[in-house]
């Protein structure tokens, strides 16, 4: 299978046109005309993940977070990012990333997260100005209302959340749930305006919790945990093509809890 054919399949679900303007989804390293037999699927491209790809003999790494996002001024092994680029090129491993292109579509990060939590009848939380069928976050309903503590248990057990930080909602029974995988604190007020009882996201700051407390149940989980299912989405797209798909075992959150 040619790499460009794999990319075409991914972009039939998550087109690069759906990504945010500041993003860098797409090819990071490599030639789209090369043959691919096996691919390693990951959330982040780290030195450990590249070494894993080398060990498995993979010709391609597909990640959610772009490898090349912040400026890279030197490729001489002085930073983890530079090490990854150096090792990938040395071992002829291509890298492709689908970031907000995968966040912004049905069948992507947020709708898959909603499905895992049993949220139904969902719609885009913040529609794209250019395409109302795309956008960031979703909002929908649990099949029945539950206590807020029951919802927190659902999040912990379903997502294997390493930690949960939260504020109390306006009402202790909740049903209307908004969510945005990754760093979505900027959409708290959108969730409030649309009547959500709870807003689930990651990377919230102190003042986000302060402004949400008593108005909406703000549920903050680990960024990686909220987006780890990107690997499953990639597998579901690519495996039917006959390419061997390996979900990385070295891909994990860098955050440790003491």
Image (cartoon, rainbow, N blue to C red):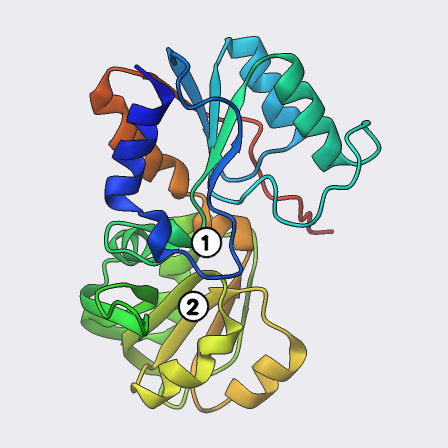
- Residue depicted at x 26% and y 33%: 9
Disc number for residue 158: none
- Residue depicted at x 67% and y 28%: 85
Task: Give SS at disc 2.
Answer: strand
Label 1 packing within 10 angstroms: few (<14), some (14-19), many (20+): many
Disc number for residue 200: 2
Mark 1–mark 2 distance (CA, rounded to whole Å):
9 Å
- Residue depicted at x 62% and y 21%: 88
Find residue 179 and report its image quarter. Answer: bottom left
Q: Position of residue 61 (x, y in %)?
A: 49, 26
The residue lying toward the viewer, choosing from 67 and 236, is 67
Between disc 1 and disc 2, whose residue precedes? 2
Q: Position of residue 50 (x, y in %)?
A: 61, 23
Location of residue 175 with respect to 96 vertically, above or below: below
Number of marks = 2
Mark 2 and mark 1 in contact (Cβ < 8 Å)? yes
Q: Is residue 229 left or right of residue 211?
A: left
Location of residue 9 with respect to 224 vertically, above or below: above
Q: Position of residue 31 (x, y in %)?
A: 47, 22
Task: Give SS at disc 1.
Answer: helix
The residue lying toward the viewer, choosing from 25 and 229, is 25
The residue lying toward the viewer, choosing from 151 and 133, is 133
For the N terminus, the image quarter is top left
Q: Is residue 248 left or right of residue 254?
A: left
Q: Position of residue 126 (x, y in %)?
A: 34, 74
Residue denoted by label 1: 226
Label 2 packing within 10 angstroms: few (<14), some (14-19), many (20+): many
């Amino acid at each position: 299978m040619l790499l460009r054919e794999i990319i075409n399949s991914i972009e039939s679900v998550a087109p690069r046109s759906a990504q945010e303007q500041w993003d860098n989804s797409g090819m990071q390293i490599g030639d789209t005309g090369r043959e691919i037999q096996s691919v390693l699927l990951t959330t982040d491209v780290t030195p450990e993940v590249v070494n894993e790809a080398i060990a498995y003999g993979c010709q391609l790494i597909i990640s959610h977070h772009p490898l090349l996002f912040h400026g890279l001024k030197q490729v001489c092994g002085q930073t983890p990012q530079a090490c990854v680029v150096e090792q990938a090129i040395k071992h002829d491993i291509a890298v492709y990333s689908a970031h907000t292109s995968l966040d912004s579509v049905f069948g992507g990060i947020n709708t898959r997260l909603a499905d895992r939590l049993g949220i139904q009848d969902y719609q885009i939380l913040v529609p794209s100005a250019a395409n109302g069928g795309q956008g960031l976050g979703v909002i929908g309903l649990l099949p029945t209302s539950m206590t807020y503590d029951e919802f927190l248990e659902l999040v912990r057990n379903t997502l294997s959340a390493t930690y949960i930080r939260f504020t109390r909602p306006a009402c202790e029974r909740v049903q209307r749930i908004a969510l945005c995988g990754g760093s979505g604190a900027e959409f708290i007020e959108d969730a409030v305006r649309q009547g959500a009882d709870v807003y689930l996201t990651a990377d919230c700051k102190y003042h986000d919790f302060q402004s949400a407390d008593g108005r909406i149940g703000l549920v903050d989980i680990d960024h990686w945990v909220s987006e780890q299912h990107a690997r499953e989405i990639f597998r579901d797209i690519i495996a039917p093509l006959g390419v061997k798909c390996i979900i990385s075992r070295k891909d994990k959150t860098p955050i440790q809890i003491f």
